[in-house]
Image (cartoon, rainbow, N blue to C red):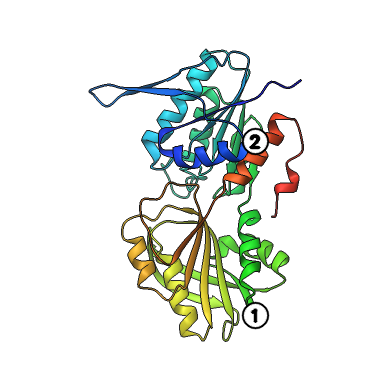
Amino acid sequence: MITPAKIFSCTQSESLSKMISKSYGQELGNIAILKYSDGEFQPSFEESIRGARIFIIGSTHPNSENLMQLLLMLDAAKRSSARHITAVIPYFGWARQDRKDKPRVPIGAKLIAKLIEAAGATRIITMDLHADQIQGFFEKPVDHLYASTIFIPYVESLKLDNLTIASPDMGGSKRAYAYSKFLKSEVVICYKQRSKSNIISHMEVIGEVKGKNIILVDDMVDTAGTLTKAADLMIERGAKSVRAICTHAILSGNAVEKIENSNLLELIVTDSIPSKQSSQKIRILSCAPLFSEVMKNVHNNLSISSNFIT
């Protein structure tokens, strides 16, 4: 008989973790966070985890403090003799630093991967990494989930005619073609040039958008500059409507205001990152059922490939 797993949550991911544990059919485990006057903190497990398989849920955004809490919890679990320690990271931050794109810079994503393993993780479950090759930065097994499993049924429910999938940049074309394969739609690509980080100097659309219902797909929305510029350009070129699907809603700065003032009809995201902002244009679909099912299968040594739409 397989002993039940135990599920714990980092502080900032508690809302999502509660939904995951409810879907899993199990209460969250007890964690206490002792905070010191200088800003340091110390997590402790308030129940025995010796010999257990445990899941620690925590997205790494906002980056530094949440990442540190996850690392300390992993270390505490290792030192408490947990048998299997799975880091469940719905949003893996630092993922845009996946290579050296200029001299004298770090490869941040690889460093974070090594830290997570050194802290004690024996397995990692995450969703829609910014770059697929980040899986190779880990020596431990990585279950890389795709939010398309969540988004595609929603898109199908819209019953849009003349549906076209769009990528906001050349790098996302693989993702766009994966969606188009399941939705049996055409694909258009946006080509953009940046004058500097997060500032687009020029954008063009490769493909026909006139009279089409467009859905832009991307792994994350940060400042929303690319999405809103693409939506405005496509409406200008005659598109009937423009929606966007983005797994991780970072929404930095005045991103929500940009979305509100743009021609974007709807932005569909997951709850991988806890949101403190709201907008009538933003629809949140929960990734909790996907993670809970995969966690169950991992615990019971079952295949998880049926959860992939890639």
Image quadrant assignment for residue 278: bottom left
- Does 123 appear above or below 170? above
Q: Is residue 50 above or below residue 37?
A: above
Compared with residue 91, is residue 159 higher up or lower down, i.e. above or below?
below
Considering the numbered disc 2 on the image, is that residue within a helix, a strand or a loop?
helix
Could you tell me if residue 279 is visible in this image? yes
Q: Amino acid at mark 1?
A: Asp
Q: Estimate how packed mark 1 is, as few (under 14), some (14 to 19) or many (20 or more) residues with alpha carbons within 10 Å.
A: few
Q: Position of residue 51 (x, y in %)?
A: 63, 14
- The residue lying at 56 percent from left, 16 percent from top is 49
* Of 173 and 293, the residue lying toward us: 293
**Looking at the image, which residue is at 48% across and 69% down?**
266
Q: N-terminal of the two: label 2 or label 1?
A: 1
Q: Which mark is residue 10?
A: none
Quadrant of the drawing holding the N terminus: top right
Look at mark 2 in the image and give the residue it sits on: 295
**Mark 1: which secondary structure?**
loop
In the image, 208 versus 105, the foreground residue is 208
**Gap between marks 2 and 1 measured at Cα:** 37 Å
Residue matched to label 1 = 161
Where residue 27 sits in the image (x, y, percent)?
55, 30
How many numbered marks have been drawn onto this rendered protein structure?
2
**Residue 208 placement (x, y as % from top left):** 60, 82
Amino acid at the residue labelled 2: Met
For disc 2, the neighbor class at 10 Å (few under 14, some 14 to 19, many from 20) is many
Q: Is residue 44 above or below residue 235?
A: above
